[in-house]
Every structure is written in C-alpha cells, then in structure tokens.
C-alpha cells in the first residue's frame, strides 16, 4: 500500500473517501467544521437528529455530501472526551480502516491525525495511523483456496499541515514504513505452519535477506560445528528431532565507523511439543509460534536495513525443533553448556532457555555494546501481564529504561520485572551447577535468572514475548502480531541518533 502526507484542505479533496472523527459532546474537529460549513450544516443536522452516535469506533458512511467533491465521507466515533488516550486513538484508526475494507475504495485521506491525543504529537499520530492501517489490511491466506479478504485500498493519504512539524512528519512516515515492512515479514514467517517453517527454512530466509540487502551478511553454524564448540545445552533440545538445529548469525554494517554491535538473540523453537515432558494436545496448539523471537530478529534486521540505520547490529538465532523420540533428552539429564556451566534438565519443556543460554554465550565473541534476547519463554509472563505488555528483565538499568521508553513511544509496551538475587536460590541443583527450572513461583523471573547466568560479561536485557508476539490459543483468532518489532525499532532509531 502507498502512504503519503497531504496538506490539502478537506473541502478541496478529490479522493474516494474522506475520513473524519467526531466526538459525542464537543465541538466539531477542524475538518468536520469545514465540511459542515460548505455543506450548509449537513453534519450538525445529522448529529442533532441522532443519526450517528459517536461512541469510540462506531462508523458511518455519508454519500455525496453537498458541495463536497469526494463521493464519500466516513464518520468515526471518538467518544465523549476531548482528548484521547493512545489506545483509543489506535482503536479509532483501526475501526476506520476496517470500515473502508467493506467497500470498494482505492484512495482515501484520513483527517484523524487532527484528533488530540494525550502527550502525543502529530508525528506520533502519523506513525500510528500508518501502522494501524497496515495492521487492519494484513491477511495471511497463502494456504487458502478461496481468498475471501481482498481489500481494495491502495493509497492512504495522511493529513499533515505544512507547519513546523511537517519535516518531522515526513521522517516519521519514512520510519514507520520501514517498521511496517519488518512487522509484516515477522508475521508472515511466524504464521507459517511448522512443517514448512523448520530450522533449515529459517536459515534459508536469513540467506535471502542477506542477498537482498548488501549491508547484511550471514553465517550458519551446523550441528557438527556447534558440537565442536561445546553447545551442549542447545544440542540437548535438538536431539529428539530429525530436523537439524541451526545457529543463524546475521550481521548488519550500517556505519563506516567502528562500533561495538547491538546483538539481538532470538529463540527459534519452530515447534514445541515439550519433548519428553510432553504437553497436552490442547497445549500444543499455537506452538508453531514458539519461534516468534527468531522471526522478530529477522524482521527487525530487515527493517533496520530498509531504513539504512547507521548502526552495527548482529542477530543470533538459535533454531531448533523440540520433539520426543528415543534419542530425546530425558528429565534429570545433565549437559554442559558453551559457557562450561553444567545444567540439570528437570523439565524438557523448559527448552527455550537451554538454546538461548548457548546463543548468549556465543554472542560474547562479537564484543557487544548490549545484548537483547527475544523469546516466547514462559506462560507465567502471560499470567502476570496478559497480552498487553512484554515482560522485561535486565542486568543494566540504562538499557532497561531505553527499552521501556521505546515501548511507550511505539505503544508496543514492556513492563519491567525484578531480577533480584533472591530468585537465584530456586535454580539450585544437587548434581549440577544449575537446574533449568525453579518451580512455579515467579517462574517468568527465574527463567530470566537462568539466562542472566550466561550474560555476566555484557549489558543484557530479556524480552519475554509469550503474551504479546502472537495470539496462540483458540481457533480462528490465532495469529502473529509482529511485536516487539516496533519496540526494538524505536530503540534502534533512538540509538542511531546518539
């Protein structure tokens, strides 16, 4: 879809549809006032007759409004407050695009950018409008014989007056289009079934990205190389599967200056049965999404390359399938990680931390500025935070604060949990240096505590996206969200300005 800024007054617009917002008990926004004036109070009469209740998200098409060149006007309800919350603005934009998708419209202009949003400026509204538009038009139907959803919308113009914020709006639009490309790539990859999206498939996708973007290079470590290095924890997860594990290393050189890289580590369990600690049948539904961390790393690097960010980035993806078999790792097996620490595997369904710990240790060789891992790691974080916030834990508060700020800026929010030493006690093993589980209490935290033992040589943050990267449960509502690509990209954009 093509996005562009448009500064033309609403009454001069010649497009398929004009989108305007209306509040329940407030003065008309500027675009609505202008339409009302040129149409001899058409909107005022309609509202006074009670033909449109402006509750948040409600929509109504008006056809051939008097004296207006555009054939349609879409009214979108904005509620009874004069200032919106960020989430309300997102809902309003999403409702407008869903309404457009019900009719044959190719070009539209949105004046929703005029609406006041708490502590948000016009560039933020430009970003969110473009992001929500792309989200509302997204469809994953490559395996469907009948393609039911075919949005006709091809061009979306976003109203931005040529004032002191116009250049910032241009920058914002450019940034969000790059971010949208990464989000879409992440969602497409995550939505694939696990019989297609295997560890070798992820490696192939990484190679394709390196072929498309000149600043990206890729290196793939096979199981033999990993065994030679001593990645006993990662390979312990792979033992039960016929699919070979891959350690995928993508490097992006966006600057000629010598920089310590920002390393993104992604959990890439392409399907998680739980291994010999087998999940229930219902518990396996949605486990194709256990590679969302890997998809996020690939999508983020794609977006960074698209925007040509002046940064040095590295993506390290541990791609493995967790299956039960005669050769699978058993509960109480003890393995030696790449760091040399021994691990007693008390639960083979706590496999993500096993592949991540070796990937974190491997990241040391890049001498990173910071390391951020992204993983659908625990069900406990979903219990704690639901589907609204990503769990964040870190051994370096400035890094944690940068990520929290990027989450607020992008509205792809995270919430910090404690990483206190007290929780480490739960990971004690009588036979090895560490157990891979710490019991039910605080299990999202103890999972991060496990990882922290392999991140002592660098500044590190852990993003547990089990509740935010995908809607994993249920039937038709299962889908990837593309999170936390927006959070990470806003973090990287902010770092590129330093």
Image: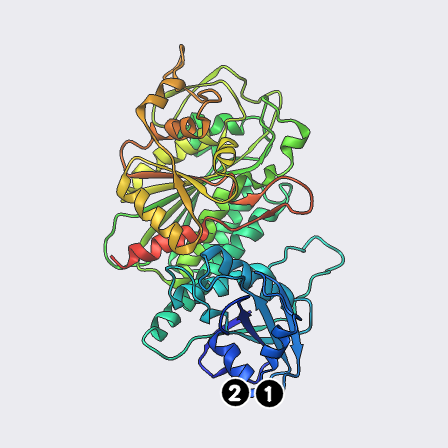
Q: Could you say where residue 159 lies in the image, as x and y percent from the top left? A: 47, 75
Taking the image as shown, residue 332 lies to the left or right of residue 366, namely right
> Residue tagged by mark 2?
12
Q: Position of residue 104 (x, y in %)?
A: 68, 73
**336 relative to 66, above or below:** above
**SS of the residue at dot 1?**
loop
Label 2 – label 1 distance at C-alpha: 7 Å
Residue nearer the viewer, 267 or 21: 21
Foreground of the two, 90 or 244: 90
- For the point 50% across and 28% down, the residue is 351
- Quarter placement of the C terminus: bottom left
| CA neighbours of label 2 inside 10 A, class few (<14), some (14 to 19), many (20+) | few
- How dense is the environment of label 1, judged by Cα within 10 Å: few (below 14), some, or many (20 and up)? some
In the image, which disc is placed on residue 69? 1
Query: In the rendered view of the protein, which quadrant contains the N terminus?
Result: bottom right
In which image quadrant can residue 400 be found?
top left
Check contact, mark 2 vs mark 1: CB within 8 A.
Answer: yes
Counting residues from the start of the chain, the first of labels 2 and 1 encountered is 2
Apparent side of residue 460 relative to residue 38 in the rendered image (left or right) = left
Q: Is residue 198 left or right of residue 180?
A: right
Question: Residue extending furthest top?
Answer: 430
x and y, in percent, of residue 258 in the image? 23, 53
Q: Is residue 230 visible?
A: no
* Secondary-structure class at tag 2: helix
Residue at the front extreme of this rendering:
48
Q: Quadrant of residue 114?
A: bottom left
């Amino acid at each position: 879809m093509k996005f562009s800024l448009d500064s033309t007054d609403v009454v001069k617009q010649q497009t398929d549809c004009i989108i305007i917002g209306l509040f329940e008990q407030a003065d008309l926004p500027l675009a609505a006032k202008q339409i009302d004036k040129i149409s001899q109070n058409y909107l005022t009469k309609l509202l006074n007759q009670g033909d449109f209740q402006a509750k948040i998200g409600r929509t109504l098409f008006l056809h051939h409004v008097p004296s207006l060149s555009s054939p349609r006007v879409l009214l979108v309800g904005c509620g009874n407050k004069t200032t919106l919350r960020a989430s309300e603005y997102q809902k309003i934009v999403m409702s407008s695009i869903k309404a457009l998708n019900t009719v044959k419209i190719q070009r539209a202009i949105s004046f929703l950018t005029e609406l006041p949003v708490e502590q948000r400026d016009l560039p933020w509204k430009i970003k969110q409008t473009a992001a929500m538009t792309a989200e509302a038009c997204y469809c994953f139907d490559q395996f469907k014989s009948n393609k039911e959803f075919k949005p006709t919308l091809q061009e979306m113009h976003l109203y931005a007056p040529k004032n002191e914020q116009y250049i910032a709006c241009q920058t914002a639009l450019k940034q969000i289009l790059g971010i949208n490309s990464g989000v879409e790539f992440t969602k497409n990859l995550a939505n694939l079934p696990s019989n297609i999206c295997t560890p070798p498939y992820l490696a192939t996708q990484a190679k394709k990205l390196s072929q498309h973007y000149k600043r990206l290079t890729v290196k793939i470590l096979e199981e033999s190389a990993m065994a030679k290095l001593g990645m006993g924890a990662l390979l312990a997860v792979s033992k039960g599967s016929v699919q070979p594990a891959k350690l995928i290393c993508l490097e992006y050189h966006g600057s000629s200056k010598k920089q310590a890289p920002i390393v993104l580590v992604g959990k890439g369990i392409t399907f998680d049965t739980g291994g010999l600690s087998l999940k229930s049948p219902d518990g396996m539904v949605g486990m194709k999404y256990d590679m969302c961390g890997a998809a996020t790393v690939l999508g983020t690097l794609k977006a960074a390359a698209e925007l040509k960010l002046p940064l040095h980035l590295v993506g390290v993806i541990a791609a493995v399938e967790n299956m039960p078999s005669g050769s699978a790792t058993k509960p109480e097996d003890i393995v030696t990680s790449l760091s040399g620490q021994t691990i007693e595997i008390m639960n083979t369904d706590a496999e993500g931390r096993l592949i991540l710990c070796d990937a974190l240790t491997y990241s040391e060789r890049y001498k990173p500025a910071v390391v951020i891992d992204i993983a659908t790691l625990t069900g406990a974080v979903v219990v704690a935070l639901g589907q609204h916030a990503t769990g964040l834990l870190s051994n370096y508060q400035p890094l944690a604060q940068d990520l929290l700020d990027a989450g607020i800026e992008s509205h792809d929010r995270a919430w910090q949990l404690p990483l206190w030493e007290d929780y480490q006690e739960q990971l004690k093993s009588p036979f090895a240096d560490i157990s891979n589980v710490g019991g039910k209490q605080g299990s999202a935290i103890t999972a991060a505590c496990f990882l922290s033992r392999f991140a002592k040589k660098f500044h590190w943050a852990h993003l547990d996206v089990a509740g935010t990267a995908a809607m994993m449960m249920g039937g038709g509502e299962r889908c990837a969200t593309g999170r936390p690509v927006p959070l990470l990209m806003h973090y990287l954009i902010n770092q590129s300005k330093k």
